[in-house]
Amino acid sequence: VVTNPVFARIAQRDAMFEPVARATTNLTPLIIVSQASPVKSLEDLNGKTIAITEAIATITQIGQQVLRLNSVKDLKFVITRSHTNSIAFLQRGEADAAISSATAIKQAVPQARNSVRVIREIASPVPPVMYLAAPGRPGFTATALHDALFAFAATDAGKRYAEALGHEGLSPVTSREMALLDDYVSDLKNQLK
């Protein structure tokens, strides 16, 4: 299974999936605004509309946490379903800011990329994806999946794949990294109630 890290932690805790690898890079959430926006800092976002891809996206959770920690209040969130749509919302004035990612901005077409500016880059210990082995698969072990993934990652095709995704390769998953996701799991489960 390839999934976002918060879902990976839920699968590990609730369904006995075993994490075997993660993207080497970490998520770099961004708070972005249009180039023409008067917004200069997070404090300027009080009472504003923020474009998000999905309420349950890990990028969104991290960005919302930073907004809360910086006492940004009275926000309205509008779901756009993609980072490209979030940029379009900024361009059309339908949102004052967006929670996006460095990878999404890097992958955007130049016109979209050049139409926004970053007001906050957020350091994060969370990877964009994790790879897990499902339990109860006869003849298919977490070790076998680990070995196959890392063998592929060492090939030219594997390196091109990781580069295209902006993942910088694969790394093992540590128990500490999994435990760091617990706050996001709690937030997600609260949202889904």
Image: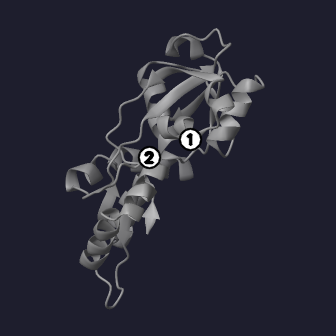
Disc 1 element: helix
Q: Is residue 16 left or right of residue 190?
A: left
Answer yes or no: do the residues labelled 2 and 1 have beta carbons within 8 Å? yes
What is the three-letter code of the residue carrying label 1?
Gln
* Total marks in image: 2
Q: Is residue 95 left or right of residue 32?
A: right
Q: Quadrant of residue 139?
A: bottom left
The label number, if any, that marks residue 166 in the structure image? 2
Instruction: Rate crowding at label 1 as few (under 14), some (14 to 19) or many (20 or more) other CA atoms within 10 Å.
Output: some
The mark nearer the N terminus, 2 or 1, is 1
Q: Nearer the viewer, residue 162 or 76?
A: 162
Q: In the displayed orientation, state which residue is furthest to the bottom.
A: 138
Q: Position of residue 56 (x, y in %)?
A: 54, 48
Q: Quadrant of the N terminus?
A: bottom left
What is the three-letter code of the residue carrying label 2?
Gly
Q: Residue at the location (26% across, 57% down)?
A: 173
The label number, if any, that marks residue 107 in the structure image? 1
Q: Residue at the location (44% across, 46% down)?
A: 166
Q: CA distance from mark 2 to mark 1?
A: 9 Å
Q: Nearer the viewer, residue 65 or 192?
A: 65
Q: Residue at the location (64% across, 16% down)?
A: 35
Placement of 93 over or under 160, stated as above or below = above
Placement of 177 over or under 99, stated as above or below = below
Q: Could you tell me if residue 193 is visible in this image?
A: no
Q: Quadrant of residue 170?
A: bottom left
Instruction: Rate crowding at label 2 as few (under 14), some (14 to 19) or many (20 or more) other CA atoms within 10 Å.
Output: many
Q: Position of residue 167 (x, y in %)?
A: 40, 49
Q: Nearer the viewer, residue 156 or 50?
A: 156
Disc 2 element: loop
